[in-house]
Amino acid sequence: MTSAPSPLARLADQPYLLLSLTSLFWAGNAVMGRFIAGHFPPVTLSFMRWTVAFLIVIPFAWRHLVEDRMMIRRHIKLMVAVSVIGISTFNTLQYTSLQYTTALNVLLLQSTGPLFVAIWALIVLRVRLTLAQAIGALASMLGVAVIILHGNIAELASIDLNYGDLLFLGAMAAFGLFTALSQKRPAIHGLSFLAFTFGCGAVCLIPLLIWEMSVQPAPAFDLTNVAAVGYVSIFPSILAYLCYNRGVRLIGANRSAPFFHLVPVFGSAMAILFLGERPHLYHAVGYALVLTGVIIAARKQKTAA
């Protein structure tokens, strides 16, 4: 008689829940990144985030890394590329952009994630969007627009794209490529993949870190900054990437991409809960459109008998 699977094992087989948790953690990262933008130079924050995350993960991942070392060595070019693109580049561009742009613009540009994933999935994996995925992505994007524009299309006139917005678009393009390339990763344990990409991504930031430290002052060592590094190292890093990598592994890049639209949904909900902002009808309409789009796009397509 076989024993029942553990709660963690059951969670690991729930891609929709895993990807929803990823969006929740990344929404918190955007809020925190904006909050401490003036406290940390972007490369320093990115380096500290991934170094701390690596140090936390490595005791749990070491045994798997030893077992997977030959497979990692055979695919070392791909593993390094995934680390540089998805860890070093994406997060450095993200934190840099948050020093120049507004939260409104970031939330709007976050919705380009599924588009970049679709483009890279077509180029790298030769996988096209299905009609349901395209309809779902458009519905979710419309829902995000309703929330961001407060249900008023005239708000479009107030959006002013700037240098930070271009950097954030570059970050989303990098993450789209990371998502597509992660589908080609070798068959290694999830913790091995996480530890290698975190560690390699942090090491690849060292040249930029040295340059940044020579031109910008070091961040203060205080409780706020330590707590901020702890938060971004655990929730949007370790937990989010564990959930995201597993979710993409289970349902693929294109079906996972619409969950990007949950990031601004969770972000606006956090503003209501923690910042005292009042909920409005447009929030409910936007949430409904986003969730409808995610359900349509993430649904597994029936195959002909």
Image (spheres, grey):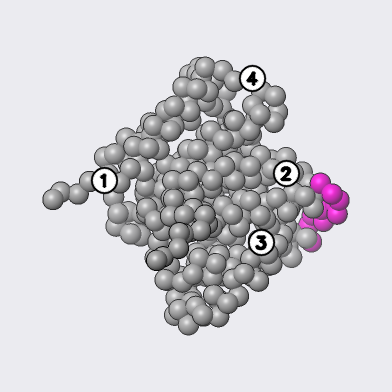
Viewer-proximal residue among 117 and 294: 294
> Which residue is labeled 1 in the image?
301
Mark 2 is surrounded, within 10 Å at the Cα level, by few (under 14), some (14 to 19) or many (20 or more) other residues, namely some
Label 2 or label 3, whichever comes before in sequence order: 2
User: Residue 265 in the image: x percent, y percent?
Assistant: 53, 33
Q: Distance between the residues labelled 2 and 3?
A: 20 Å
Give the quarter of the figure containing the N terminus: bottom left
Residue kind at label 4, given as amino acid type: Arg
Residue kind at label 3, given as amino acid type: Ala
Q: Does the magenta stretch include residue 82?
A: no
Residue kind at label 2, given as amino acid type: Ala
User: Residue 184 in the image: x percent, y percent?
Assistant: 39, 65
Label 4 or label 2, whichever comes before in sequence order: 2
Q: How far apart are marks 1 and 4 (CA)?
A: 39 Å
> Is 296 situated above or below 275?
below
Give residue 53's mark: 3
Q: Note whether residue 297 is visible.
A: yes
Q: Distance between the residues labelled 4 and 3?
A: 35 Å
Q: Distance between the residues labelled 1 and 3?
A: 36 Å
Label 4 or label 3, whichever comes before in sequence order: 3
Give residue 279's mark: none
Give residue 37's mark: 2
> Which residue is labeled 4 in the image?
278
Residue kind at label 1, given as amino acid type: Gln
Residue drawn at (67%, 51%) of the image? 232
